[in-house]
Image (cartoon, coloured by chain):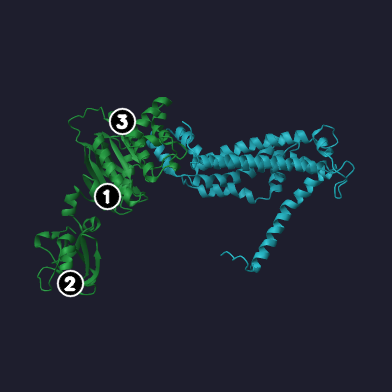
Chain colours: A cyan, B green
C-alpha cells in the first residue's frame, strides 16, 4: 500500500533504505575509488590523497614499455578465449536444450550431473584438470586444458538459461512448421532459432563474461601464458602503481559497453517482435 | 475473385472416392491408457464435420492423428482413398489450423502464409504473390505486412486460415478455432468458416466443446466421450434422437429421466407446466426460473436429486406463472419421450 503524502513513513522503510544504500556502497564504492585513483597525478601513489591529475597511467598501460605486465597480449588472449568459450557454450547448450525437450530416460540425472559443476569448488576443478593432464603426460595449455576448465563453468550456466528459454518455446510453432512441410533443419533455422534468439544472445553474453572474468579454474590450467585476470593478479602482487587502477577503469568501461550493446540488441529484437512497427516489405 | 480460381482443386475425382476422410478402428494408447479407442468414421466429400465432446474425450487426439502429429497405435486413416496412416504431416493432403493459431511471431502475415511455399523452394516474389491471393481470400489483404502481435485475435485467425489453405488441403483440420475469440466475433467467424468450406468444396474437421458451434456449422456431428464415438450424424438427427444419456445431456436441451426402469430423453422445449394430477409427468419443486427473452426456463427439482427443465414461451409462462419454491409438474406428449440405450 502506498503511504499518503505527509504521512510518516514506516520504520521498515528506513531499514530497507539503509540496506539498499549499503548495497550500493559495496557495489559501486570500490569501482568509484578505482576510477578516481586511475587519474592519479604523476607523483601520486596507490591511495588517496590525489597528487593532482594525469593520464600517465593510461599511457603506460597502452604503451609497450615493459614496466607493467604484458597487458595487451593478455587482453587479446582473454578475448580470444571468451569468444571461443562463448561460441562453444551457445552451440552445446542450444543442442542440449533441443535434445532435452524429449524426456528421454536419464534426462534428469544427466541434467543434474552437468549442473552440479556449479557447486564444485572452482580451485579444485582447475587443480584436478591440471593434475589429470600431468598424469596423462600432456602439457596444460590455454586452448586445451584452459578452455576445458572454463567450459566446466560456462556450460552449466548456459544450460540453465537455454532450458528456461526453450521451456517457454511453444511446440505448436514447430508442429505448424512441420504441417507446412518444413524439414528438421528448416524448422530449426526458420522458426526455432529466430524465436529463441534473445535467449541465445543471453547465453552467448553469459558465456563471454563468465569466461572473460574466470580466475580460479583458469589459474592452474592455462599453461605458460596468462589470461587478463591472471595477469592483473600477478601485477597486484608484483608491480605496484596506479596503472592497475587505469586497467580497472578501462576493463570496466569495456565490459559496460559490451553489456549495453547486448541489452540494446535484445531489446530491439523483442520490440520488433512485439510489433513496435511493421517490417518493411 | 482471383484467389478462388487459385484454390479450386484441379483433381478429377475417381468415382470410387466418396469420402474425404475415413478412419478405421483407430486407437491411441498412452502408457496403457487408451485416449482414443477404436474410432471409425467416414466423412463424405466436402462436408463440415465437428468433433464434439468434453475436454479429455479424445477429440483433439483424434484430430492430431488425422494430421499426423500423433501416431495412431492401431487402425488406418485414409484421406481421399489413400492410406496415410504412416505418412508425414505435410504429405497427407491435410492442413491444420492450431489452437491459438501458432502464427510465427517473427514473420509478417504474408511471410507466414508463404512459408509452406518457401520450404518447397518457391522464389520469393512468386510465393509472396500467391500468399497475397490467399490473404485476399480471407479478407486480410491490407494487413499483409503486419506481425502477429499487431493483429487482433480475429485477424490472426484469418491469417492462420490462409496459411493452412495455401497448401491446398483435401481436408482442413481446425483445433478449437473459435475458442480464443470473444462471443460476438465467434459467431461472425463461424459464418466465415462455413462460407469458406462451401466455396472451396473441401472437408473441414473442426474440434469443439461447444454444442452450439457444432449444431450451427456441421453437416456431420461426431459426439465423443472417453475415447469413443458415442453418436455421429446430422445435427438434427442427434438433437432429435440422442442415442445415449450422455449424448442427450451433452447436446443440451434435453431432460434425462427414468421411466419404468428405462431411461428416456425429453426435449425441454416439448415440456410444459401441467397440473398436479396429470398422469405422465415429472413432479417436484420449482428450483429456478430463468427469463431468457422469448422463452422462460423453469427448472424443477424432483426426488433423488433429479432435475428437469421446461422451456416455455414467455407468453405461456406469464399467462400462468410459477414461483420458485412452489410445486410444479412437467408434462409432455408420449411421442416426445425418446428411449435411450443406456
Q: Residues within 10 Å of mark 3 (few under 14, many from 20)?
A: some
Between circles 2 and 3, the one closer to the viewer is 3
- Residue B213 badge: 1
Residue B265 percent location from the top left of the image: 17, 60
Residue farthest front in this picture: A6
Q: Is residue B312 left or right of residue B158?
A: left
* Element carrying mark 1: helix
Residue B123 picture location, percent across and down? 42, 24
- Compute the Cα span from label 2 to label 3: 59 Å
Q: Which residue is more in the foreground, B30 or A195?
A: A195
Picture quadrant of residue B315: bottom left
Point out the image quarter for the N terminus of chain B. top left
Q: In the shown orientation, is residue B311 left or right of residue A60?
A: left
Residue designated by label 3? B3
Image mark for residue B328:
2
Report if the CB atoms under discs 2 and 1 are less than 8 Å apart.
Answer: no
Q: Earlier in the sequence, mark 3 or mark 1?
A: 3
Q: Is residue A201 above or below residue B306?
A: above
Secondary element type, mark 2 = strand
What is the number of the mark on residue A121?
none
First of labels 2, 3 by sequence position: 3
The quadrant holding residue A3 is bottom right
| Residue drawn at point x = 23 percent, y = 50 percent | B215
> Which of A74/A120 is in front?
A74
Q: Is residue B267 among the parts visible in the rendering? A: no
Amino acid at each position: 500500500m502506498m503511504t499518503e503524502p505527509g504521512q510518516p513513513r514506516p520504520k521498515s522503510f528506513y531499514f530497507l533504505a539503509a540496506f539498499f544504500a549499503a548495497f550500493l556502497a559495496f557495489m559501486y564504492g570500490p569501482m568509484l575509488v578505482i576510477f578516481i585513483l586511475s587519474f592519479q597525478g604523476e607523483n601520486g601513489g596507490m591511495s588517496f590523497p590525489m597528487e593532482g591529475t594525469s593520464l600517465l597511467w593510461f599511457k603506460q598501460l597502452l604503451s609497450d614499455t615493459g614496466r607493467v605486465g604484458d597487458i595487451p597480449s593478455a587482453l587479446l588472449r582473454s578475448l580470444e578465449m571468451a569468444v571461443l568459450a562463448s561460441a562453444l557454450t551457445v552451440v552445446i547448450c542450444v543442442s542440449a536444450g533441443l535434445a532435452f525437450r524429449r524426456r528421454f530416460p536419464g534426462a534428469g540425472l544427466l541434467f543434474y550431473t552437468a549442473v552440479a559443476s556449479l557447486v564444485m569448488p572452482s580451485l579444485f576443478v582447475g587443480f584436478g584438470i591440471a593434475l589429470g593432464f600431468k598424469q596423462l603426460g600432456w602439457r596444460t595449455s590455454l586452448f586445451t586444458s584452459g578452455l576445458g576448465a572454463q567450459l566446466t563453468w560456462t556450460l552449466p550456466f548456459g544450460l540453465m538459461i537455454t532450458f528456461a528459454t526453450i521451456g517457454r518455446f511453444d511446440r505448436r510453432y514447430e508442429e505448424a512448421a512441420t504441417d507446412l512441410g518444413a524439414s528438421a533443419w528448416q524448422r530449426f533455422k526458420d522458426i526455432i532459432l529466430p524465436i529463441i534468439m534473445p535467449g541465445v544472445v543471453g547465453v552467448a553474453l553469459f558465456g563471454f563474461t563468465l569466461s572473460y572474468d574466470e580466475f580460479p579454474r583458469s589459474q592452474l590450467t592455462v599453461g605458460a601464458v596468462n589470461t587478463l585476470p591472471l595477469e592483473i593478479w600477478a601485477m597486484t602482487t608484483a608491480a605496484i602503481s596506479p596503472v592497475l587502477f587505469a586497467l580497472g577503469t578501462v576493463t570496466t568501461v569495456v565490459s559496460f559497453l559490451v553489456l549495453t550493446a547486448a541489452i540494446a540488441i535484445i531489446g530491439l529484437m523483442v520490440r520488433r517482435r512485439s510489433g513496435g512497427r511493421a517490417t518493411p516489405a | 475473385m482471383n484467389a478462388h480460381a487459385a484454390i479450386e482443386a484441379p483433381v478429377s475425382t475417381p468415382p470410387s472416392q466418396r469420402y474425404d476422410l475415413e478412419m478405421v478402428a483407430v486407437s491411441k494408447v498412452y502408457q496403457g491408457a487408451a485416449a482414443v479407442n477404436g474410432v471409425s468414421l467416414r466423412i463424405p466429400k466436402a462436408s463440415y464435420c465437428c468433433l464434439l465432446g468434453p475436454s479429455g474425450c479424445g477429440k483433439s487426439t483424434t484430430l492430431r492423428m488425422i494430421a499426423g502429429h500423433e501416431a495412431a497405435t492401431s487402425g488406418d486413416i485414409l484421406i481421399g482413398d489413400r492410406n496415410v496412416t504412416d505418412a508425414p504431416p505435410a504429405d497427407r493432403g491435410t492442413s491444420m489450423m492450431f489452437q491459438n493459431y501458432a502464427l510465427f511471431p517473427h514473420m509478417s502475415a504474408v511471410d507466414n502464409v508463404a512459408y509452406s511455399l518457401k520450404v518447397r523452394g518457391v522464389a520469393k516474389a512468386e510465393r509472396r504473390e500467391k500468399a497475397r491471393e490467399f490473404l485476399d481470400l480471407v479478407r486480410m489483404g491490407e494487413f499483409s505486412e503486419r506481425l502477429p502481435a499487431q493483429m487482433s485475435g480475429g485477424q490472426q485467425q484469418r491469417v492462420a486460415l490462409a496459411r493452412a489453405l495455401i497448401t491446398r488441403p483435401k481436408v482442413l483440420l481446425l483445433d478449437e478455432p473459435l475458442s480464443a475469440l470473444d462471443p460476438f466475433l465467434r459467431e461472425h467467424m463461424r459464418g466465415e468458416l462455413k462460407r469458406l468450406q462451401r466455396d472451396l468444396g473441401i472437408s473441414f474437421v473442426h474440434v469443439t466443446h461447444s454444442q452450439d458451434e457444432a449444431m450451427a456449422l456441421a453437416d456431420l456431428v461426431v459426439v465423443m466421450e472417453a475415447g469413443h464415438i458415442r453418436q455421429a450424424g446430422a445435427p438434427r438427427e442427434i438433437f432429435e434422437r440422442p442415442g445415449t444419456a450422455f449424448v442427450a445431456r451433452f447436446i443440451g436441451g434435453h431432460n434425462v429421466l427414468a421411466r419404468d426402469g428405462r431411461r428416456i430423453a425429453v426435449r425441454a422445449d416439448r415440456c410444459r407446466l401441467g397440473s398436479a394430477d396429470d398422469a405422465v409427468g415429472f413432479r417436484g419443486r420449482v428450483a429456478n426460473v430463468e427469463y431468457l427473452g422469448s422463452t422462460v426456463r423453469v427448472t424443477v427439482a424432483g426426488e433423488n436429486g433429479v432435475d428437469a427443465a421446461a422451456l416455455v414461451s414467455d407468453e405461456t409462462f406469464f399467462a400462468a406463472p410459477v414461483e420458485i419454491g412452489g410445486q410444479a409438474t412437467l408434462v409432455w406428449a408420449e411421442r416426445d419421450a425418446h428411449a435411450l440405450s443406456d
